[in-house]
Amino acid sequence: MYLYNLTLSRASAITSAIYGNFSAPKLQEIIVSRGKVLELLRPDENGRMQTICSTEVFGLIRAIQPFRFPGAQQDYVICGSDSGRIIILQFSKEKNAFVKIHQETFGKSGARRIVPGEHLAVDPKGRACLIGALEKQKFVYVLNRDNEARLTISSPLEAHRGQTLVYSVVGLDMGFDNPIFAAIELDYTDVDQDPTGEAASEAQKHLTLYELDLGLNHVVRKQSDPIDNGANMLVPIPGGGDGPGGVIVCAENFVIYRAVEGRELRAVIPRRSSLPGEKSVLIVSAATHKQKNLFFVLLQSEYGDLYKLTLDYEGEIVRDMHVKYFDTIPPASSICVMRKGFLFAASELGDHALYQFQARRVFFDPRPLTNLDPIDSLESLAPILDLKLANLANEEIPQLYAACGRGCRSSLRVLRPGLGIAEMAVSPLPGNPTAVWTVRRSQAAEYDAYIVVSFANATLVMSIGETVEEVSDSGLAGGLATLGVQLLADDSLLQVHAGGLRHVALALAGGDLLLFELNAQGQLVESEKRPLGGEALGAAPESLLLAASPGGGLTLAVGLATGLLLRTEVDPVTGALSDTRSRFLGTRAPRLFRVALGGAPAMLALSSRPWLGYADQGRFALVPGSHAALDWAAPFASEQCPEGFVAVAGGQLRVLAVERLGQRFDQRAVRLRYTPRELLIHPDHKFHAVGLEAGEESAAALDQVGCPTGLPGRWGSCVRVVDPLALATTDCVELGGNEAALCAALVGFEGEDALVLAVGVARGLSFYPKQSEGGAIHIYRFGPGGRALELVHTTPLDDIPRAMVAFRGRLLAGVGASVRLYDLGKKRLLRKSEYRKLPTAVAKLAVNGNRVYVGDASQSFLYLKYKKSDNSFYVFADDTVPRSITAALNLDYDTMAGADRFGNLHISRLPPELSAQVEEDPTGGKFAGQSGVLGGASNKLDSIINFHVGETVTALQRGTLQPGGREVLIYSTILGGLGTLFPFASREDLDFFQHLELHMRAEAPPLLGRDHLAFRSAYFPVKSVVDGDICEQFAQLPIDKQRQIASELDRSPGEVLKKLEDVRNRII
């Protein structure tokens, strides 16, 4: 088996964000890291965040910082990663890509505790940077410019200190004096030598200053002073004429100002009145806003509260420090204050947001008015905790149902492949229209002036203003069916109808075209026609569209009666047609229309559903739109909707707009109360989904204010029944008794007419230390129509149930380190069988026939067989390597797909000959375990697939994502990413993509210096998987490199791109 890995939707979580001018001097932009993806974002004139560039780096981005030289107008980016190298990047506006300026190696690859990359600090004047590890090692690099103003970097200067943990590092603003870096450190020298633990409890954190002497080119440890042991983060204060300098030390419940000379001021962080006394307040993110003669610091606590910190100072002397409550937003991993009055918050979990500062009067009110107005949000699926693929809406393609988020910001999201299309306005029409057009008053006009709707024997003209109104003085004939409307070069309006020969281009019966030109007298004159090129088609064409391609050439799009869309390159000189590509769009012949998206021309294709074709980072993307079928469309531009289109369907006129360009899935959400744990889909009532939620009890449930967590060991849970069509909750059962719902299963017990719901809960669960008061299994029956739940009974357990599944008319539950088989009783579940010799704890369960597949919390998969005559389970096979299973899916009788917490995907299979021996064994494998080695089973599984995703995989599903498509393996990640593993259909395709992957590794190494093969083999050597993500970067290479790689593959660049496009089209 060989698979092709392709990311469908990149991770949506943001781990860090920085602000600066990266592509042009006055453009305010944000660079975010999404685990292994680097993105450049820019707010447009309407305040919506647009993705300018997104790059997969094939490595873990651990830290990013901007810097610029004095007098420069653009920022560079310094990156710390798991490559063991420090990387300096610059964004190239011409290439629309990040360009590597410098790459310096200093250590081994991997996220190691003593290899720098976790901490990154930059001198505010751009003269030096410090890159540090979690422990011991710190390197300082001097940054400079040569005679040609090119950036240079020095050899590393060591600032190591053994047996020292580093919590935070920043560069202090010293003006043009020697750069100084401040760090929170903890020396654990005595801890290792003290077995009693007293030294660990008495260990003291210090604020240490490192000074870079530019004259001597040497780093010295200038001073080290004790600070509060709750200190976790440093925030530098502007200096050198812009402020007093120094640093803010953020600690539990306090913020402390420390000057370089050692002066100290302390202020208490305001607390919520509802916060329990045992809970402390900790600052998790900060941003400094600096203007001429003004600066302030925004701090955010772990609960999402924002505080504004200001200093009263004169010169370098700080007299007082004020910390005031500012606002509350969801907790963020990073916040950025922009010069135009925007605040960007990269939320830890859930959607990211862009806010605008507002100056408002302060009134005395129980709920104070906010100082921020949300103006845009970036959808985020992080974290995806469960995923199901099902066609509950009876559409052409199935939908993905994702359980996302944490606490009261959780949601159940319905994902449909394609772009989200929003209806801006809907208006009924007096009949069924046949076509629609939009025209402007003049060629220089910015917006459309008229909407022209054609019926079978009439034409309706409407003017566009603040409202859309019918007009009768447009000059167009209203009593005839219109064939076309066009604004000519002299700003005159041309209407084409069946009774008038005033067409710009006429089609004759023989397939020829008569072309007309507008002369100086305003008359249409027939021009000479020249046949340039042609191509035979397999079906009658329905629609044609000639447009510019992203590469700068011409592309002819043809919609055929069979539902196929053909795209072929047109030579602008000779008219020759070449490099034809096809894609099936639907059961209706596609009609093609020219629209505008993202400030560039795009294509709208209307088939059984709408499709949009546009340029996405240099390549052509053709994606479906999440909307019902449309009959006719035209581009639409107004002040309220600058890039939309107007369409007619079913007697209605609709004004539509794309919600966000570049998104891979359209999302619809149902808000949840607690963190979702598991999703189930009722097979009989397919229009209902059952969701399991659990979370620590909260005092509030406001989406913006957030939910302050309760005390450890206090839980609230519920079981929710959701109608996925109406996106509404039909029933919600609250679980009391301090229960945390962990798993569930739909079971058809013997003797029962309908499925029942089994819910496994833990009571009094706490993780630090890990303990509980036991668990229980609740049994629920579904009411009429499956819309409600009714409790049947509860069975107490002595341990925590973590996985359950239906098995041969009974319930199979993983309780602690055992597997138990239960039958349904009148007052409780009846235990029928149990296997207690599992290694650690049951994490996942799957069944097939009489086999049970157990995913262990640390020892990978174990295969068990159930022997009915003995009513017993026996382990007959296990894995050869330990894995902490986080997701599992049974593929066939011998094969399991799984994922572990370290971001590895694998497929394990029992060899066929061993499987046959187990089936032929008359004892059913009863004595097989006694012949094992070192306590393991006698039979071992083979790992036929190994692949490092780079993010923890949380769920696995199999199915198709398009009509008639091949089955693929779909996975979701904790950072909100979605990907697939696609089986190759032929040896020829496998050889092609394997060689393309080899060439891409050599010719286009990852941006941050991580070796691609080493990254995909981070824990286990990659096996039998081709990485489609690096193959798809072929389209972003310069044309000369494309020709070089294509020639070595005995193909042209167009053929390589066509091959990449074909395999993506087979998946989604």
Image: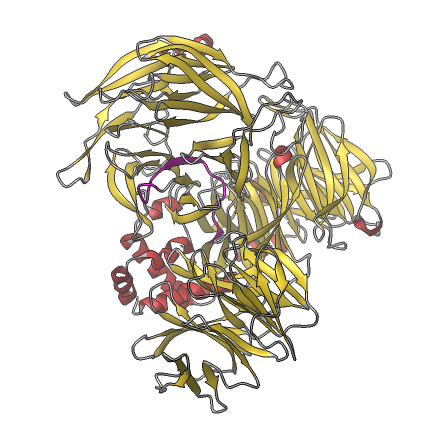
Looking at the image, the residue that sits furthest to the bottom is 510
Q: Is residue 871 visible?
A: no
**Residue 952 lies in the magenta stretch:** no
Residue at 72% over, 35% down = 718
Residue 642: percent from left, percent from top = 50, 55
Structure colour scheme: secondary structure
Q: Position of residue 558 (x, y in %)?
A: 47, 75
Q: What residue is shown at x 62% (from left), y 76% (from top)? A: 478
Image coordinates for residue 510, horizontal then vertical, percent: 47, 91
Q: Main secondary structure of the magenta part?
A: loop
In magenta, the rendered stretch is 7-26
Q: Is residue 696 left or right of residue 750?
A: left
Q: Is residue 180 left or right of residue 403?
A: left
Q: Is residue 8 magenta?
A: yes
Q: Nearer the viewer, residue 198 or 21?
A: 21
Residue 833 as seen in the image, left or right of residue 1023: right
In the picture shown, does residue 482 fall above or below 461?
below
In front of the other: 421 or 431: 431
Instruction: Answer whether residue 565 is visible to the viewer in this image.
Output: yes
Query: Eyeballing the image, is 867 above or below 817?
Result: below
Nearer to us in this view, 1044 or 428:
428
Relative to 94, does residue 734 appear above or below in the rendering? above
